[in-house]
């Protein structure tokens, strides 16, 4: 059934709205069953496991805006694949302890793609994304994306970290985190996608600490990607680790894998 309404991005009324992914579909590939099914595993054992297909989608964007986002997402997909495999073909790297120094990232596309994901999670109706509220920055994000204005490295800086569990990097983890804080002053929006923790600092004009500048994605294509345990990154997945061992979760994967 065709849905007609106002595009959430360009605000064009009477647009044919497409089923837009809140999180790009390529991030789901590692959690799909063979028939492209997946389920969000709620920590509450009383909540029924709902079968989903093709990732979470909502009627949000017109075809023009959908195409715009997909171009940025294509570059993000290629970059994320390299981070996951630790095999870089379009970038150069230097290893400094547990930190990978990456040069040659397509700053414009990767930054815009990540801002679009945080924006879509903020405006999504699905309760899985209820933690994501950009507040006054929601309109800022929309304007940047709509007008294709690439913010500076110090504006809404993006950080990437490879999360580890028992010393191993697990690319099959998608985990909503929502809003957190860096120190007493900065609000962050964070999400785990394919085992990579993406942090976005909610600031455009305030001076950010040097360590954030040094590690965040920069316009010259440089980003520092540390490998840290989820505990160090402020992600508590202990409850999740216990939950996936429960009978209802095992039954789901026995049926659909």
Image (cartoon, helix red, strand yellow):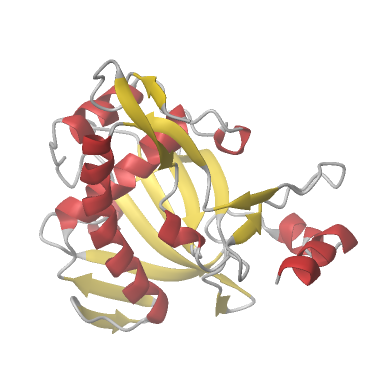
- Seen in the image, is 135 located left or right of residue 254? left
Image quarter (top left, top right, bottom left or bottom right) of the C terminus: bottom right
- Seen in the image, is 6 located left or right of residue 187? left
Q: Quadrant of residue 250?
A: bottom right
Q: Eyeballing the image, is 58 above or below 96?
A: above
Residue closest to the eye, 187 or 51 = 51
Picture coordinates of residue 91, whole percent (x, y): 19, 76
Q: Quadrant of residue 3?
A: top left
- Seen in the image, is 34 located left or right of residue 42? left
- Seen in the image, is 38 located left or right of residue 111? right
Picture coordinates of residue 162, whole percent (x, y): 45, 68
> Residue, x 53% and y 44% (percent of image)?
56
Residue found at the far top of this picture: 13
Q: How many marks?
A: 0
> Residue, x 27% and y 50% (percent of image)?
70
Residue found at the far front of this picture: 1
Q: Eyeballing the image, is 34 above or below 74?
A: below
Residue closest to the eye, 167 or 6 = 6
Q: Is residue 144 visible?
A: yes
Q: Eyeballing the image, is 252 above or below 155?
A: below
> Residue, x 31% and y 80% (percent of image)?
96
> Residue, x 23% and y 25% (percent of image)?
10
Q: Is residue 185 visible?
A: no
Picture coordinates of residue 89, whole percent (x, y): 22, 81
């Amino acid at each position: 059934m065709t849905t007609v309404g106002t595009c959430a991005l360009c605000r064009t009324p009477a647009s044919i709205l497409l089923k837009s992914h809140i999180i790009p579909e390529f991030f789901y590939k590692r959690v799909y069953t063979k028939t492209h099914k997946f389920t969000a595993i709620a920590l509450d054992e009383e909540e029924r496991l709902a079968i989903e297909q093709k990732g979470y989608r909502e009627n949000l964007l017109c075809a023009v805006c959908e195409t715009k986002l997909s171009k940025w997402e294509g570059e993000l997909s290629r970059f994320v694949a390299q981070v996951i495999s630790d095999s870089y073909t379009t970038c150069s790297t230097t290893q400094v302890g547990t930190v990978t120094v990456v040069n040659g990232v397509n700053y414009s596309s990767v930054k815009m793609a990540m801002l679009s994901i945080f924006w879509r999670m903020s405006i999504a109706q699905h309760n899985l994304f209820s933690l994501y509220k950009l507040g006054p920055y929601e309109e800022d994000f929309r304007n940047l994306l709509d007008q294709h204005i690439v913010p500076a490295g110090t504006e809404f800086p993006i950080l990437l970290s490879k999360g580890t569990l028992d010393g191993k990097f697990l690319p099959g983890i998608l985990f909503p985190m929502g809003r957190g804080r860096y120190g007493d002053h900065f609000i962050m929006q964070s999400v785990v996608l394919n085992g990579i923790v993406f942090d976005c600092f909610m600031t455009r004009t305030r001076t950010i600490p040097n360590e954030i500048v040094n590690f965040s994605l920069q316009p010259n294509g440089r980003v520092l990607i540390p490998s840290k345990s989820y505990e160090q990154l402020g992600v508590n997945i202990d409850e999740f680790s216990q939950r996936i061992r429960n009978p209802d979760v095992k039954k789901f994967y026995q049926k659909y894998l």
